[in-house]
Amino acid sequence: MVFDAINVRDAFRYMQKGQHLGKIVLKFPENPNELPNTLVRSQMELRGDASYFLVGGLGGLGQAIAIWMAEHGAKNLIFFSRTGANKVSQSFFDELAELGCCVQVFAGDISDLAAVKNVTGKQTNRWRSADVHGSEGKHVGSPLCSDWLIIIYRTVHLTKCL
């Protein structure tokens, strides 16, 4: 089946049906200026009334992600790290505060269910859990054990892939 490049959406919808046999081809015009050029930029907004539980997240990459989250609406960040805030510059926490973000840091091991329950039981804001590797889920109150295990699995699985 051949689709003109200008109808690329139709080609993907056709492919999505899963009823085709063979290849799906896009035919491009001789002059590329004939194709519409639209810049699509979606702006992600995080909820300010939710708490975001970050496992680790106090190294360079995690700090960059936390600042990005604060710039996109996160107002409550909870870090759960083996080292706690011991090795983190105060300027990082100051920057988050300037962005209107409330930060809590807890030391502990994410594989210790009692430690996780201890931390999550202290939170009153609506939960949104996300570790720095991208697993996400919604919780009201404390995360369930099964949710906690899914977060651990995704983190460990991604770490093995890296």
Image (cartoon, rainbow, N blue to C red):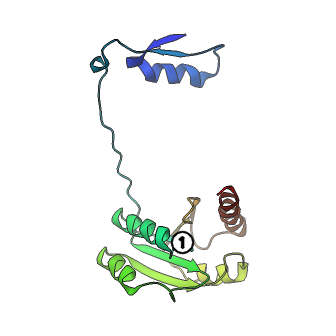
- The front one of 122 and 39 is 39
Counting from the top left corner in percent of width and height, residue 44 is at 38, 53
**Residue 17's image quarter?**
top right
Residue depicted at 47% across the width and 13% down the height:
3
Residue depicted at 43% across the width and 74% down the height:
76
Counting from the top left corner in percent of width and height, residue 77 is at 46, 74
What kind of element bears circle 1?
Answer: strand
**Residue 53's image quarter?**
bottom right
Q: Which kind of residue does numbered mark 1 sit on?
A: Phe
- The front one of 24 and 45 is 24
Residue depicted at 66% across the width and 13% down the height:
21
Counting from the top left corner in percent of width and height, residue 140 is at 56, 68
Counting from the top left corner in percent of width and height, residue 100 is at 32, 75
Residue depicted at 57% across the width and 21% down the height:
15
> Residue reaching furthest bottom?
86
Q: Report which residue position mark 1 lands on.
A: 53
The quarter of the rendered structure image containing the N terminus is top right
Is disc 1 surrounded by few (<14), some (14 to 19) or many (20+) residues within 10 Å? many
Please tell me whether residue 26 is drawn above or below residue 111 in the rendered image.
above
Please tell me whether residue 152 is drawn above or below residue 39 in the rendered image.
below
- The front one of 143 and 3 is 3
The quarter of the rendered structure image containing the C terminus is bottom right
**Residue 109's image quarter?**
bottom right
Please tell me whether residue 71 is drawn above or below residue 92 in the rendered image.
above
> Residue reaching furthest left?
33
Count the marks. Answer: 1
